[in-house]
Amino acid sequence: MAILVTGGTGYIGSHTVVELVQSGNDVVILDNLSNSDERVLGRLKEITGRDITFYKGDIRDRGIFEEIFAKEKIDSVIHFAGLKAVGESVSKPWEYYDNNITGTLTMLDEMRKHGVKNIIFSSSSTVYGDPDQVPVTEESPKKACTNPYGWTKSMLEQILTDMHTADSEWNVVLLRYFNPIGAHKSGRIGENPDGIPNNLMPYITQVAVGKLKELSVFGDDYDTRDGTGVRDYIHVVDLAKGHVAALKKLEPGSGLSIYNLGTGTGYSVLEIVRTFEEVNGVKIPYVIKGRRAGDIAENYASPKKAKEELGWVAENGIREMCEDSWRWQKNNPGGYAD
Ligand code: NAD
Ligand code: WQD
């Protein structure tokens, strides 16, 4: 049996495909390439030695699922496909709700029609909103989101929970990622944003490689150690391994499970900048700017539940995350075009 990985040519999906294959799983990828590059498939072959079956298609298209479920033996889905740019979601809410919600609803209907009722879903720490207390546990309340992207994650968690309540044959794992950064040690796959990056680490690596002049640090007046925002950065390979560990919660009768995937340690923006400079021997010029709308001061996970129930812990520290992000960017300044 194979695992269908939607969004499998994207940043987290591609790293997860590597870990799945290397732990002995058969994988089929479905991606519409709206935010990824088909050339990642060649890189996946270099790393794993395997040709990964790929379908180019959209999760809103029933036909592509009919084709995949007819041709492949799928027993579970790891669902990464979706739009993820927070700022863009504010200006294009319909596109975000259509892609992420209509797409997932279409997929879930096709899955149940074909008797496939096992799913791991990419959720986000964004569902905790501005938490009252850190670290956040899986029992911390979900709060109002500040943008349509966040709402799609929050709503899809609810939809999947209700699907399981109505039909206990569904096994659902909601993985709440904190801030994934880093890249595969080979330097052959990594994050490849289109245009100017929204997130901190790809912005830093593009400054380091000379594509961007300087980093804007969004606010130094938060109630944190040095006034800049604190987040729980997690190495993307550790995150990928979290999905392999979560497969055991798709065994019959597992039901609904929710896990934070983070390290449990928060770092400020300036701590990330300094660590990046130190481990890589490059300078990151920055200027302090005002706060970015919708940002919160501090968020980091309690990863205790994933450790206890899945036996999973993040192994890479912040130095490795900075080193591996830089290796990828330095070796591939133009992304997969190089
Ligand atoms: P990504 O954009 O690199 O990957 C998403 C992939 O989905 C892309 O390859 C894209 O082409 C594909 N896709 C988008 N819409 C599609 C559609 N309608 N049909 C088929 N394919 C489609 O993003 P990522 O960082 O790898 O994120 C993967 C998942 O994890 C997303 O659901 C994202 O919301 C979630 N997530 C990401 C982060 C993060 O910081 N990167 C944090 C928490 C959660
Ligand atoms: C991190 C810190 C910024 C860019 C987002 C989504 C979240 C999840 C992960 C998907 C903050 C600061 C950033 C820059 C900066 N994604 N920063 N200058 O906002 O924690 O989370 O990605 O689910 O839902 O909201 O990540 O990397 O954008 O920011 O100073 O140019 O870096 O203010 O403190 P964020 P980020």
Image (cartoon, grey):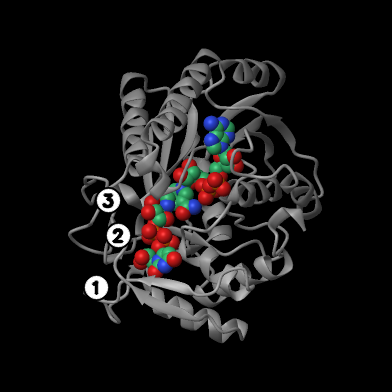
The label shown at residue 128 is: 3
* Residue 243 visible, this angle: no
Relative placement, left or right, of 190 versus 136 is: right
Label 3 or label 1, whichever comes before in sequence order: 3
Front residue of 258/7: it is 7
Relative placement, left or right, of 11 versus 67 is: left
From the top left corner, tell me how far across and down residue 159 is, in percent.
34, 28
Label 1 or label 2, whichever comes before in sequence order: 1
Give the class, few, some or many, for how many residues have Cα within 10 Å of label 2's Cα (few <14, many ≥20).
Answer: few
The label shown at residue 222 is: 1
Relative placement, left or right, of 267 versus 329 is: left
Q: Which of the two discs, 3 and 1, sits closer to the camera? A: 1
Q: Is mark 1 within 8 Å of ligand 2?
A: yes
Give the class, few, some or many, for how many residues have Cα within 10 Å of label 1's Cα (few <14, many ≥20).
Answer: some
Q: Is mark 1 on a helix, strand or loop?
A: loop
Q: What element carries label 2?
A: loop
Q: Does the residue labelled 2 lie within 8 Å of ligand 2?
A: yes
* Residue 267 visible, this angle: yes
| Up-down relation of residue 8 to residue 71 (above or below) | below
Residue beneath label 2, please?
Answer: 295
Q: In which quarter of the image is the C terminus?
A: bottom right
Q: Which residue lies furthest to the top in this view?
A: 113
**What amino acid is found at the position of numbered circle 2 in the picture?**
Asp
Within the image, what quadrant is residue 6 found in?
Answer: top right
Q: What element carries label 3?
A: helix
Front residue of 173/196: it is 196
Q: Quadrant of ligand 2?
A: bottom left
Q: Which of the two discs, 3 and 2, sits closer to the camera? A: 2
Q: Give the CA separation, mark 3 to mark 1.
A: 19 Å
Q: Give the CA separation, mark 3 to mark 2.
A: 13 Å
Q: Residue furthest front?
A: 213
